[in-house]
């Protein structure tokens, strides 16, 4: 088989690779990760690169190498390190560290540590916990390396059609957790043999992949899990490099699309003790919600899709350096906050919500999402705002940053993608409200969880209609509550029992099967 030389600019890296490989594969061999949020299907168009000598544009995931190449990779096509939320709510006073006792049988026992792992579709967060007292000694986070196979669980289920591909998914996440464990132990100056217990909380698909359980049925109606049960597995069976006498505990799932991470969030926020009507929203690709009080709890998955993670948005990205994270109106223009204080090249989820709220406030778009004609706004908006209107690919667009020939923009198509994501989450909330018989005014607390939720501005979320119309003071950020819940379950048998009971107590609602789903969804797409 022929091999060809590939040079990557501006990195200055050169590798040799066999004919027929894609540029994405070649970049990976060179240690460069490209933005393939569609799983390499060529649909997201985020991996655009330029080939010398004529700067021809090609998609790196689709272009097959049949000659020597010099490839220039623009910033927007790179998979940047994402800002990952690691902190959660304080739960320490609520738990008894009794799991420690099964390992520390003598006073001279060595230090006993555990890992609490929030196994997210996009990010993986691990905490090294002192099992004796429950203190967190170190925290590490990483992008889930499975993102190269697709940004959402459906893409990964579609990828894993053979045993070989499924094994690749499984081993990739095992390697990631082993790597995080090694980094944590290095930080804390202990050996990985001092880790005796790992607790993993992920959505149902991620839990299945981690355990090596079948996932095909999760991608087909009626979307049933192979198992919802909590499990305890010896580390050797999964290839996890901790003390071989230890144990791996996975948390109880709720349903096919509402997993153990939601169980952990519900446990950490203590929603089963809530006297007031409480709504938990974990805003991410899946958009899980839990609604209720101590008397009755409901859960649903909203399938918001990856738009809020930057996919399917023309200039969208994850929360990385150079991404616009906030947009506000000043006297005669708009101001931007950019992650890393560098020139902007994209917009992430929190910036997208802000930008749409600002565009609504200015009248750039109406509540249906349709762009206004600039000439109708001439006497209502400052010249600097009017100058941001332009057309791209015969679509109206609004320039947030950058020059006209290389703008960071939101187009009509982007607004529609935002409406689909926002509509899915809001429809899920509305349908649960209907099931319980509640108006917006009956919702006393809204808890925003997850790596994404913590960076949203309350007023912007309310302005676009993402959340029920409540006073902003009722909205509280609870950080990475899934990791906090996983830590509780890691340490305490009582919490493990409580998590099992909680997962079984929460009633799952398949909102797509509700008779008025289409009508509610269509209404929820309006701003």
Image: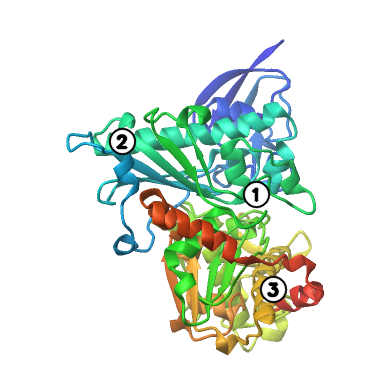
Give the vertical position of 522 relative to 1 (above or below).
below
Residue 152: give its label.
1
Q: Earlier in the sequence, mark 2 or mark 3?
A: 2
Q: Earlier in the sequence, mark 1 or mark 3?
A: 1
Q: Disc 1, disc 3: CB below 8 Å? A: no
Q: Between marks 1 and 2, how big is the CA–CA gap?
A: 30 Å
The quadrant of the rendering that contains the C terminus is bottom right
Callout 3 crowding tier (Cα within 10 Å): few <14, some 14–19, many ≥20 = many
Q: Between marks 1 and 3, how big is the CA–CA gap?
A: 20 Å
Residue found 64% across the figure and 59% down from its top: 307
Q: Between marks 2 and 3, how big is the CA–CA gap?
A: 44 Å
Which one is in front, 155 or 308?
A: 155
SS for callout 2 = helix
**Where residue 187 sits in the image (x, y, percent)?**
28, 38
**Where residue 290 sits in the image (x, y, percent)?**
57, 69
Q: Is residue 276 left or right of residue 505?
A: left
Give the vertical position of 257 relative to 218 (above or below).
below
**Where residue 378 sits in the image (x, y, percent)?**
66, 85
Residue at which label 2 appears? 185
Q: Is residue 429 left or right of residue 237?
A: right
Q: Disc 1, disc 2: CB below 8 Å? A: no
Residue at which label 3 appears? 427
**Visible in this render: residue 379?**
yes
SS for callout 1 = loop
Callout 1 crowding tier (Cα within 10 Å): few <14, some 14–19, many ≥20 = many
Q: How is the image coloured?
A: rainbow
**Visible in this render: residue 482?**
no
The quadrant of the rendering that contains the N terminus is top right
Q: Earlier in the sequence, mark 1 or mark 2?
A: 1
């Amino acid at each position: 088989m022929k091999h060809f030389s590939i040079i990557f600019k501006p990195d200055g890296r050169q590798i040799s690779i066999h004919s027929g490989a894609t540029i994405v594969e070649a970049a990976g061999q060179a240690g460069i990760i490209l933005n393939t949020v569609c799983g390499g299907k060529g649909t997201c168009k985020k991996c655009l690169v330029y080939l010398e000598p004529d700067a021809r544009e090609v998609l790196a995931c689709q272009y097959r190498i049949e000659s020597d190449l010099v490839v220039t990779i623009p910033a927007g096509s790179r998979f940047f390190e994402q800002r990952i939320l690691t902190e959660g709510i304080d739960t320490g006073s609520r738990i008894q560290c009794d799991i420690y006792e099964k390992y520390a049988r003598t006073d001279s026992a060595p230090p006993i540590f555990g890992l609490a792992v929030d196994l997210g579709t996009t990010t993986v967060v691990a905490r090294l916990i002192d099992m004796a007292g429950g203190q967190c000694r170190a925290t590490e986070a990483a992008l889930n390396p499975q993102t190269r196979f697709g940004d959402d669980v459906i893409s990964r289920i579609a990828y894993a059609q053979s045993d070989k591909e499924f094994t690749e998914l499984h081993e990739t996440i095992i390697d990631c957790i082993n790597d995080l464990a090694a980094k944590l132990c290095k930080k804390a100056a202990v050996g990985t043999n001092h880790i005796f217990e790992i607790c993993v909380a992920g959505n149902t698909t991620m839990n299945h992949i981690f355990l090596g359980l079948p996932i095909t049925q999760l991608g087909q109606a009626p979307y049933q899990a192979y198992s919802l049960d909590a499990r305890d597995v010896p580390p050797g069976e999964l290839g996890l490099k901790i003390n071989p006498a230890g144990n791996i505990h996975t948390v109880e799932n709720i349903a096919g699309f509402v997993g153990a991470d939601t169980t952990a969030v519900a446990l950490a926020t203590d929603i089963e003790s809530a006297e007031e009507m409480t709504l938990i929203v974990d805003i991410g690709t899946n958009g899980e919600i839990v609604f209720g009080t101590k008397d009755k709890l409901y859960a649903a998955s909203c399938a918001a899709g990856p738009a809020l993670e930057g996919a399917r948005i023309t200039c969208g990205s994850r929360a990385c350096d150079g991404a616009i994270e906030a947009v506000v109106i000043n006297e005669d223009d708009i101001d931007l906050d950019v992650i890393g204080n560098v020139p902007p090249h994209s917009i992430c989820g929190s910036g997208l919500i802000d930008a749409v709220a600002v565009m609504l406030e200015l009248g750039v778009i109406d509540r249906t999402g349709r762009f206004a004609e600039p000439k109708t706004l001439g006497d209502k908006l400052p010249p600097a705002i009017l100058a941001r209107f332009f057309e791209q690919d015969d679509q109206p667009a609004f320039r947030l940053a950058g020059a006209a020939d290389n703008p960071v923009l939101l187009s009509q198509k982007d607004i529609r993608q935002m409406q689909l994501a926002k509509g899915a989450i809001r429809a899920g909330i509305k349908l649960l409200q209907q099931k319980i018989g509640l108006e917006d005014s009956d919702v006393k607390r809204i808890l925003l969880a997850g790596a994404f939720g913590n960076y949203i501005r309350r007023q912007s979320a309310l302005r676009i209609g993402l959340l029920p119309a409540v006073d902003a003071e009722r909205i509280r950020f609870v950080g990475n509550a899934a990791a906090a819940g996983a830590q509780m379950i890691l340490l305490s048998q009582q919490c493990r029992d409580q998590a099992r009971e909680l997962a079984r107590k929460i009633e799952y609602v398949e909102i797509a099967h509700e008779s008025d789903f289409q009508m509610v969804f269509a209404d929820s797409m309006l701003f």
